[in-house]
Amino acid sequence: MQRNNPLAILYSIISIILQETRLRIYLALSIGALILGIVAQVAIPLLFKLLIDSLINENKSILLVSSYGLIWMLSQISMSLRELLMHGIEQRSSKLLMQKIIYKFYHLPLQYHYDHSLGEYIDILQRIQRHVPLLIWGSLFYLVPVLIELVAVIFILLRWYPLQYSCILFITISLFLLYTLFITKRALIARHSAIKQQKKTASTITDWLSHYELVKVFGRIPYALQKISHALSKRELTEVKALKLFDFVRIGQSCILGMGLTCLSLVISDAVTTGLLTPGDFIMLNGYLIQFMMPLGMLGYIFRDIKNAFLELQDVFKIIDLVSEQSIKNNCIRLTKPIKVIFDKVSFNYSMKKSILKNLSFTIEQGQTVAIVGPSGIGKSTIIRLLLGLYRPTNGIIYLNVISLHTIPPEELYKHIGIMTQETFLFKGSLKENILFAQPDTTETELNNILSQAQLLPLIETLPDGLDTCIGERGVKISGGEKQRVGLARLFLRKPTIALFDEPTSSLDITSEKDIIKSIMNLKNTTKIIVTHKSNLLEQADITIDLSSIDFSLQPYVNANYSDSVVKTEI
Ligand SMILES: Nc1ncnc2c1ncn2[C@@H]1O[C@H](COP(=O)(O)OP(=O)(O)OP(=O)(O)O)[C@@H](O)[C@H]1O
Ligand SMILES: [Mg+2]
């Protein structure tokens, strides 16, 4: 569904609310409270009229007196109850919408993430938090009740009173609305420019104050004061203009309401003196006029907020409507060990402008160690990304055994492929949580083994709470080499059939490097594809793929004992 019109956006938000039973109950209850409130609001002036008339006729009715008070109480309680229930609905629907967006984030094609910054996505989430509650409250619980109440009052007037009263009410309301919408628009523009000017003034003052040494040394204090005073005067002007316009909103509204009240009072008082209407009618009609004008006074602002919310939420629904990464339907595909990796004339480029890999062909048998070398930016990590299925070759095919890699469902692929990335991602949490992120169901003994293989035990001994020490954001900072060891531990925990390493020892000292290489090489039956520049690792490789040759898109150097494992290269 195209969701660029307000009704479609509102519909989408309501359908989110209707998804959860609890929200459905809350919504039903708050609509009940809303209806109760509307009925009570409309009934109050009517009861007041009946009460006054009965008192004038010296006919005191206990029932009327007490029901007047009760209905008033009911109207107040139903309003508070509505708000109480709404908070839950507003916040839960923002949460559900945010969850939807975050789910989408993980399922969008990689290209989307490269084309958009994370900041844009965070901004979208903030918009949801800001605007969804406002939109639900403004449209469902402000606009709708105000309109229903107005219609109810106009109906009462048309049904039981001469047409001229409804006309006066209608004209007053129309003038009130037109004036409110027109002047609040101008008042809001003035407020925006006042806010802008405030920011400019603040930055001017910060500028001149922070360079106080320069100002003093050059003897230019009067000049700086003059600049600051100029900025302050501008702020003063725009602020006063905005405040004045807001006062005008209220003055104009009071004038229109006053004129409406005067006209209505004049015609009703005539009718009261001629005995056509009672004093109770006089009070009731005045009551309606005042009671319903008050919420309309806010209409300009709320209308602006709702309009703004619709605009801001359009982008949110554009993301939901984006096509997710194509899911692989072939759920029955299973990879069985041993797995042979075959690159068959694989070419790849991220964009049309630059070709990264060209006609790359090689075969890796299960258990082999392959080193990928070449200068920075040549495409080493790209080979790893292709093997992870994050991109599809522009030309050619990557096979795992006889199965084309892009037809293997991700869950099956990632059961067999493990990665140690160039940068280790650490989230806020304990070191243990960070490591077990790779394989949560690991036993303590297994974990201890892995910690020793990844050379993490010396680090853990120095940490204040050992494995439970909080690392990452605001936690204990750990060094680049230590991060790499965490990355390795994660990979070891996965026990992959094919292990991909992107510069696994780049931040390690010589001793640690030796130990880590030993641990890596201990993964005997695992195919190890390693991007590296370290001679220690190169020496251990069965195959070295050197991407640095100028003439060849791939210039593999093959160790003697595995010469037949490199299939083809092309110029
Ligand atoms: N998502 C992307 N979109 C466009 N170009 C990219 C993208 N990722 C990488 N590149 C470009 O592709 C080329 C190869 O990148 P790759 O990350 O494979 O290099 P690398 O050989 O691993 O380099 P390094 O040794 O510095 O890690 C580089 O020129 C890089 O700028
Ligand atoms: Mg790289």
Image (cartoon, rainbow, N blue to C red):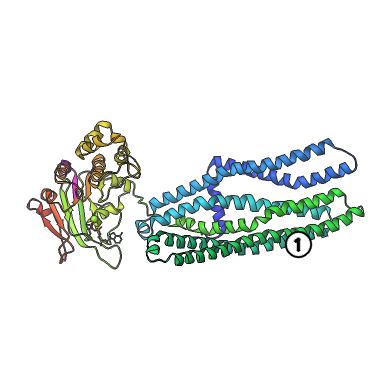
Q: Residue at x 40, y 64 (%)?
A: 215
- Magenta span: 518-529
Location of ligand 1 given as a quarter of the image: bottom left
Q: Residue at x 61, y 53 (%)?
A: 139
Q: Residue at x 45, y 51 (%)?
A: 101
Quick check: 200 left or right of 565? Answer: right
Q: Position of residue 157 (x, y in %)?
A: 80, 54
Q: Residue at x 70, y 59 (%)?
A: 253
Q: From where the camera sits, is residue 49 visible?
A: yes
Residue furthest top in the image: 445
The residue that label 1 is drawn on is 171
Quick check: 286 left or right of 5? Answer: right
Q: Position of residue 3 (x, y in %)?
A: 52, 58
Quick check: 374 left or right of 35? Answer: left
Residue placed most toward the observer, 282 or 364? 282
Circle 1 sits in a helix, a strand or a loop, which is it? helix
Q: Position of residue 552 (x, y in %)?
A: 16, 64
> Residue 198: within the magenta?
no
Q: Is mark 1 within 8 Å of ligand 1?
A: no
Would you identify the image quadrant in which residue 476 lies?
top left
Residue furthest right in the image: 274
Name the amino acid type tagged 1: Ile
